[in-house]
């Protein structure tokens, strides 16, 4: 029923939002700020034209509900908030596509679709102000660490509970919003890819299989400081030599397993030009969609670090900074997403997501979930240059709408 769907309107509304909430440096819809509140009010006005019920939950997420023949609900999610100087599509494309789909479903089914359809605008997906992303969705899924979140402060020393109070949210009660998932039968999210995979394949759209698991460690090599002139090469205990070998090894490990590995930081001590390095501290970030492969990448990095330490007659120690399991999306919804993309643009492609998204929280909460990615020009996000071709945005709305219709049928089965 494409006649009811107007993807060009979504593009026009994205531009309208950009002009209202952006400046020459990009989007400025940082969560819990005035501009974010204004952006949400702008959205609400558009939603109120439909026969829907709208409310904010205990964590400040906004839920818009179009009641259907059954309480079982199709959820479509996104986030109106952005990073400071952000892009014009990250998060709000999902919400505005959801708005257009609500309009189509309402028109096609005369206000009474076969299943209930709900649009959720998650609060503070980006975590730009407090350094904790996925706030609203992790409160909803129940994975939010309350003790950690309670202590978070922004650059001005304002705590997260204080900032929430400003927007009418009681921090101690945020997890009560989990009850919103009571009738959730499926969760769908459209998002700009934020990477170059679809661009390199010259494809507008892709089906997301899940989000990468992450293992993040500090590796410290312990050698001995020695004079750079008087110490023969054969007598050195050079901590940097082993770290340098690790720098090459992680490329081989990533290639063997099809994951990604990054040494993002390297700090040497004493860190002066005239001394052999006594201590070298590197960070290692490893990511993979498959938990087993991620475990093997970690194990091989451990073995390699021991080997390089032994070769250099030095010691090595490891410390874990953070880890998260891979989150896999629902197989049946993945198949429906492939179908929707295939019908819209002929070819479909499956890929993993490097960044986390609210969808991962819904999958962790046990809601059958899938995401669709649209190609990102330059493969860049969290930057004002973030962009997608307009015809690709329109294809994305069309394909995402087909996915929503297929998912409603799937829920009704
Ligand atoms: Zn996003």
Image (cartoon, helix red, strand yellow):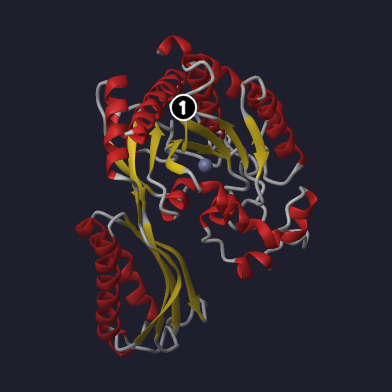
Q: Residue at x 29, y 62 (%)?
A: 291
Judged from this view, the residue extending furthest toward the left is: 256
Question: Residue at position x 51%, y 77% from top?
Answer: 271
The picture quadrant where one finds residue 364 is: bottom left
Q: Vertical placement of 82 versus 148: above or below?
A: above
Q: Is residue 91 left or right of residue 247?
A: right
Residue 92 at x, y percent in the picture: 56, 33
| On-image quarter of the C terminus | top left
Q: Which residue is mark 1?
A: 388
Q: Position of residue 43 (x, y in %)?
A: 66, 28
Image location of residue 167, percent across then percent down: 76, 47
Report the label total: 1
| Residue density around tag 1, few if under 14, some if 14–19, many if 20 or more, within 10 Å | many
Residue depicted at x 40% and y 31%: 374
Residue farthest top in this picture: 3
Q: Please tell me whether residue 195 is drawn above or below residue 176 in the rendered image.
A: above
Instruction: Answer above or below: position of 166 versus 215.
Output: above
Q: Is residue 96 left or right of residue 186?
A: right
Element type where label 1 sits in the image:
loop
Q: Nearer the viewer, residue 131 or 237?
A: 131
Vertical placement of residue 146 versus 348, above or below: below
Q: Which residue lies at the image location 30% right of the left edge and 83% below the top edge?
A: 309
Of residues 270 and 156, the one drawn nearer to the viewer in this rendering:
156
Relative to 136, is 204 on the left or the right? Answer: left
Q: Nearer the viewer, residue 16 or 199?
A: 16
């Amino acid at each position: 029923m494409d006649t009811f769907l107007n993807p060009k309107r979504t593009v026009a509304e994205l531009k309208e939002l950009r002009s209202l909430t952006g400046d020459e440096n990009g989007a400025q819809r940082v969560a819990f700020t005035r501009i974010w509140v204004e952006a949400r009010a702008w959205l609400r006005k558009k939603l109120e034209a439909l026969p829907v019920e709208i409310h904010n939950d205990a964590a400040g997420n906004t839920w818009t509900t179009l009641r259907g023949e059954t309480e079982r609900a199709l959820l479509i999610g996104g986030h109106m908030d952005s990073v400071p100087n952000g892009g014009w599509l990250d998060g709000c494309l999902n919400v505005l596509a959801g708005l257009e789909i609500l309009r189509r479903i309402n028109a096609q089914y005369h206000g009474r679709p076969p299943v209930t359809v709900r649009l959720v605008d998650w609060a503070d997906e980006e975590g730009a102000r407090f350094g904790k992303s996925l706030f609203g969705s992790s409160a909803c899924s129940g994975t939010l660490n309350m003790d950690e979140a309670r202590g978070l402060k922004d650059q001005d020393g304002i705590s997260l509970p204080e900032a929430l109070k400003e927007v009418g949210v009681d921090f101690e009660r945020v997890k009560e919003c989990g009850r919103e998932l009571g009738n959730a039968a499926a969760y769908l999210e459209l998002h700009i890819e934020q990477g170059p995979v679809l661009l390199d394949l010259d494809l507008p759209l892709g089906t997301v299989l899940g989000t990468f698991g992450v293992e993040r460690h500090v590796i410290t090599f312990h050698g001995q400081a020695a004079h750079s002139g008087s110490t023969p090469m054969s007598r050195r205990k050079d901590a940097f030599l082993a770290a340098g070998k690790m720098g090459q090894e992680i490329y081989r490990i990533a290639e063997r397993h099809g994951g990604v590995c990054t040494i993002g930081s390297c700090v040497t001590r004493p860190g002066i030009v005239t001394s052999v390095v006594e201590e070298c501290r590197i960070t290692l970030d490893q990511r993979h969609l498959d938990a087993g492969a991620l475990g093997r990448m970690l194990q091989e990095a451990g073995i390699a670090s021991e080997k390089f330490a032994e070769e250099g007659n030095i010691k090595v120690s490891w410390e874990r900074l953070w880890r998260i399991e891979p989150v896999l999306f629902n197989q049946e919804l993945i198949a429906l997403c492939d179908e929707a993309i295939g019908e819209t643009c002929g070819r479909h492609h499956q890929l993993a997501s490097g960044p986390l998204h609210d969808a991962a929280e819904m999958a962790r909460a046990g809601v059958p979930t899938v995401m669709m990615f649209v190609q990102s020009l330059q493969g860049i996000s969290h930057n004002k240059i973030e962009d997608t071709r307009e015809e690709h945005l329109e294809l994305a709305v069309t394909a995402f709408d087909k996915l929503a219709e297929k998912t409603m049928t799937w829920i009704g089965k």
